[in-house]
């Protein structure tokens, strides 16, 4: 009986292989394999007793079967008898759903670039905002080899505008050599301005107005507009309208020394007259975030950024030849220190007992960024391999007094619910680091059942992100924060990390002035969820596991992988929410 059983296994093995089986005396079946014999294989492997008669019957049936292409049989066998690694990868893929929406265009992130982010007042000091934006656009053109007339629309975000180039998108695009037939406009929404630029582009593609969008952002803090006082401005305007010498002399005589005091750009919330640093200090105190925790997070940000920079992971940074100066090729704000050095700094806003310092806050930065967004059909038709899908977006707003920087805690649960995901599903987190205290407060809020029940109307907390997935290439504290450009950096970083780490979903969040936040399934806080699938070549072509597949791409290892990359953007806009009035400073 054991001999019959062994003969049976030898027969079925020869159905899929020409290799000789050690200890098996059966003759080769031949090169003609019958694909319908595969179910018989399953029967053979489940029987405990096989008779000689059954074995001989199987042999006769195989010899009489019609010829079939051996490659087909091998392919079928490979799919049926996959290795444990392939099966594991397939299970992993099936465990995470697709975020594609029926009837909605697939919109993809093709590429993203940025100029080096530099401390204000350094190498970029003699430039203008449109110079940096132009450099980012030219870098995007060079990296993608995109024809300059292939773009349908250009959108840029900025916060503190240069009055000479109020529509910086138009001036930068013309300077970069784009066709003057391409419309361009500029948007502003504090620190999420470039996020608004991207979502505006997504809307244009979804509406069928465009197929190819360039979005970006720029901020230039080295030369911010400084105005005369209001009284002086009124006097100067009146002088311009004066018709006689007497009127002019009278107006000149009315000028007092106080009129000459300039007006600097506001660093405080207009609605509350409170600086953002002061708000961050109060928020940290409300959630019990200590000075030590903030300094530790700041040191982590700089350390990780330095490691990423040295390892060449910040591939979105392009070299920029500054006119009259040297070529700039990397960020200059990354400065790993020590806890001892950080502890020596004094509070910057609430003195003497505050916990927010210059070291655990983001610094004033010059820089620009740009991304290429296209419909999937257009991108593939032009030969591009997208980095991620852009799926959805949501904006969230809070009370600008007590919850100015708390947007991520409000937006994250909403964007996850919108996408049908949980924190555990997210592989990559990229949160904008305005202040270390702001980040830690949001993480504590996300991990608080009390906060979820009291302010979110949820029964349980959504949970804090795992730190081994969180801002692993540094963040705004170390890389820098050009207000209008950070959003594109966050999105591009998530896409690159998903590719590098083999993840599927990513989430981006950023806070902004006015108590708003962005979420891509991600507003003043900004969240972004990106989704990328890696599928081993079990499906050679066509639909795979109920999801669409980008054509196979040959990898460096010589292995063909089917790759699906998606990004979910989620931005939520809501009304004023309850304040943390019961949390006192």
Image: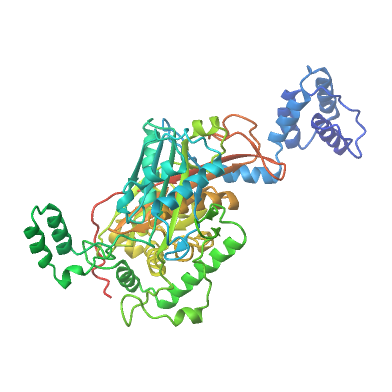
Residue 423, how many percent across, how many down?
Answer: 46, 55
Q: Residue at x 39, y 62 (%)?
A: 222
Nearer to me, 398 or 353: 353
The correct choice, above or below, for 368 with respect to 1 in the image is: below
Residue 256, how many percent across, how many down?
Answer: 14, 71
Label total for image = 0
Q: How is this picture coloured? A: rainbow
User: In what quadrant of the picture does the N terminus appear?
Assistant: top right
User: In what quadrant of the picture does the C terminus appear?
Assistant: bottom left
The correct choice, above or below, for 219 with respect to 268 in the image is: above
The correct choice, above or below, for 485 with respect to 69 in the image is: below
Nearer to me, 276 or 118: 118
Q: Residue at x 39, y 75 (%)?
A: 357
Which quadrant holds residue 152? top left
Residue 464, how many percent across, how many down?
Answer: 44, 61
Whether residue 414 is visible, yes or no, is no
Nearer to me, 122 or 445: 122
Residue 99, how many percent across, how many down?
Answer: 46, 40
Q: Residue furthest front?
A: 245
Determine whether, in the image, residue 421 is placed left or right of residue 94.
Answer: left
Whether residue 193 is visible, yes or no, is yes
């Amino acid at each position: 009986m054991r001999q019959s059983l062994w003969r049976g296994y030898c027969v079925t093995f020869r159905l899929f292989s020409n290799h000789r089986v050690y200890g098996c005396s059966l003759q080769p079946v031949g090169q003609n394999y019958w694909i319908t014999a595969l179910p018989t294989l399953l029967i053979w492997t489940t029987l405990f007793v096989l008779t000689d008669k059954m074995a001989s019957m199987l042999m006769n049936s195989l010899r009489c079967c019609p010829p079939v292409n051996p490659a087909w049989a091998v392919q079928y066998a490979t799919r049926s008898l996959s290795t444990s690694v392939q099966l594991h990868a397939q299970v992993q893929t099936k465990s995470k759903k697709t975020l594609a929406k029926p009837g909605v265009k697939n919109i993809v992130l093709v590429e993203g670039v940025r100029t080096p982010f530099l401390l204000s007042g350094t190498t970029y000091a003699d430039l203008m905002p449109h110079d940096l934006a132009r450099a980012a656009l030219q870098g995007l053109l060079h990296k993608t080899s995109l024809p300059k007339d292939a773009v349908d629309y250009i959108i840029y975000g900025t916060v503190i505008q240069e009055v000479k180039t109020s529509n910086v998108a138009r001036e930068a695009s013309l300077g970069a050599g784009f066709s003057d037939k391409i419309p361009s406009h500029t948007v502003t929404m504090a620190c999420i301005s470039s996020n608004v630029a991207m979502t505006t582009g997504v809307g244009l593609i979804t509406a069928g107005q465009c197929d190819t969008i360039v979005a970006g952002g720029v901020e230039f803090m080295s030369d911010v507009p400084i105005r005369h006082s209001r009284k002086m401005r009124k006097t100067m305007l009146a002088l311009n309208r004066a018709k006689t010498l007497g009127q002019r002399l009278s107006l000149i005589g009315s000028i007092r020394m106080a009129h000459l005091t300039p007006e600097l750009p506001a660093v405080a919330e207009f609605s509350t007259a409170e600086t953002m640093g002061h708000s961050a200090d109060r928020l940290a105190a409300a959630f019990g975030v200590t000075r030590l925790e903030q300094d530790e997070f700041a040191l982590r940000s700089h350390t990780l950024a330095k490691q990423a920079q040295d390892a060449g992971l910040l591939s979105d940074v392009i070299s920029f030849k500054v006119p009259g100066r040297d070529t700039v090729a990397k960020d200059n704000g990354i400065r790993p220190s020590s806890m001892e050095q950080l502890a020596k700094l004094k509070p910057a806003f609430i003195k003497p007992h505050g916990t927010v310092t210059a070291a655990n806050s983001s610094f004033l930065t010059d820089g620009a960024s740009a991304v290429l967004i296209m419909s999937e059909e257009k991108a593939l038709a032009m030969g591009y391999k997208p980095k991620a899908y852009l799926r959805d977006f949501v904006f969230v707003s809070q009370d600008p007094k007590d919850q100015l920087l708390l947007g991520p805690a409000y937006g994250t649960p909403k964007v996850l619910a919108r996408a049908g995901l949980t924190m555990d599903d997210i592989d990559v987190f990229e949160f904008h680091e305005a202040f270390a205290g702001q980040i830690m407060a949001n993480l504590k809020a996300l991990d608080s059942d009390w906060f979820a029940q009291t302010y979110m109307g949820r029964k349980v907390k959504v949970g804090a992100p795992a730190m081994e997935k969180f801002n692993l290439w540094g963040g705004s504290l170390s890389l820098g924060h050009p207000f209008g450009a950070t959003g594109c950096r966050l999105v591009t970083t998530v896409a690159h990390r998903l590719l590098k780490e083999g993840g599927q979903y990513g989430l981006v969040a950023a806070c902004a002035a006015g108590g708003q936040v962005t979420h891509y399934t991600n507003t003043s806080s900004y969240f972004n969820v990106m989704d990328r699938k890696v599928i081993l070549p079990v499906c050679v072509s066509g639909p795979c596991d109920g999801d669409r597949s980008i054509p196979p791409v040959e990898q460096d290892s010589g292995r063909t992988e089917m790759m699906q990359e998606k990004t979910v953007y989620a931005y939520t806009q809501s009304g004023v929410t309850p304040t943390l009035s019961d949390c006192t400073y």
